[in-house]
Amino acid sequence: MATNHPFQGKVLDSAQLMLGEGPSFDPISKRICWLNIIGKELHELDPASGEKTVTSLPFMASVVAAIDAERQLLGTEDGLFIRNRSTGELSLHVDFEPNKPGNRSNDGRVHQSGALWIGTMGKKAEDGAGAIYHVAKGVVTTLFDAISIPNAICFSPDGATAYFVDTSVNRLMKVALDPATGLPTGAPSIFLDRSEDEGGIDGAVCDAEGNIWNARWGEGAVDRYDTTGRHTDHYELPASKTTCPAFFAASADRLLVTSACEGLEDDEIKANPMHGATFDLGITVKGRLDGIYKL
């Protein structure tokens, strides 16, 4: 039985986003970055000073990753784009899913090798419309297709295991990888089956000890699982639609969580100003930062 922890953290950012997603800590700018997918916005926050910027985007984006001091990578409904940090100029890197205008990007993460794993889904969450792709230096490889809602993409500390889920199925999968490339070396297997439980398995991160921290959509919580899949801890949050965690700070010893208002009625959103906000879970963790995408 998991240990339950009432929320003792704080609000990092009070903006009520319709679909806050894709958080990460940029090791170059030292800023937290996340997306408002439906609102077509990139949010960046300096946790030390509290300085924040919001950048409007011409498309829905769900993933942001560092490239170097001048550039970021954005995973969007129109493909992968390189963004100039200072000017905001966008240039297409690669369209990983051409000829599917009904789809958008969803969960994604950079592997230690510098390759990106990114998932897609139908804009109306159509059954089996999406897939998960591996993108290395602009070369796209389809990993898994017929995915409805790809989530929980994360990697073990040694880069030899990947985790992912189709939230519509709610079975967290694991697959062995070549640590040098981030490509699978075998078939995936079920790591955790929550198909009979309430709350969707949403975004996840894997810490320096191999534990998985997973946001539970509809449950207002982050769950921690050890390397065997044992549910050890359940951390409550004051927003029901928790979407994705991310480690942050220079030593990656803090954990933030994004949330959403999507699927809630207007009166529910007004009644709880925490819906759609971004939180510091208020605990010390042994985290690790995502890789930097290699061009």
Image (cartoon, helix red, strand yellow):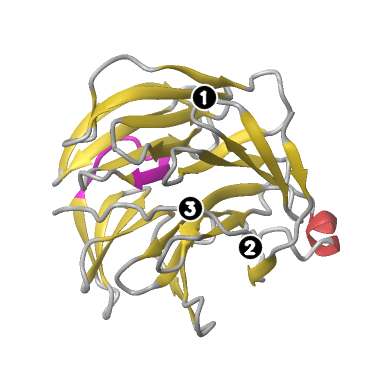
For the point 70% across and 63% down, which residue is it?
A: 9
- Front residue of 89/22: it is 22
Picture residue at 64% right of the left edge, 53% below the top? 260
| Secondary structure of residue under mark 1 | loop
Residue tagged by mark 1?
228
**In this image, 176 relative to 278: left or right?**
left
- Do the numbered discs 1 and 2 sit on residues whose CB atoms are within 8 Å? no
Residue position marked by numbered label 2 in the rendering: 279
Q: Earlier in the sequence, mark 1 or mark 3?
A: 1
**Marks 1 and 3, how far apart at CA:** 18 Å
Residue type (three-letter) at the residue carrying disc 2: Phe
Q: Is residue 226 above or below residue 263?
A: above
Q: Name the residue: 64% across, 22% down.
A: 194
1 vs 2, front mark: 1
Q: Mark 2 or mark 3, which is nearer the start of the sequence?
A: 2
* Image quadrant occupied by the C terminus: bottom left
Query: Amino acid type of disc 3?
Result: Lys
**Label pair 1/3, CB-CB below 8 angstroms:** no
Q: Nearer the viewer, residue 32 or 134?
A: 32
Q: Is residue 103 magenta?
A: yes
Task: Answer whether residue 237 is visible to the viewer in this image.
Answer: yes
Image x and y of residue 25, in percent: 41, 63
Label 1 or label 2, whichever comes before in sequence order: 1
Q: Is residue 39 left or right of residue 62?
A: right
Q: Which residue is mark 3?
A: 286
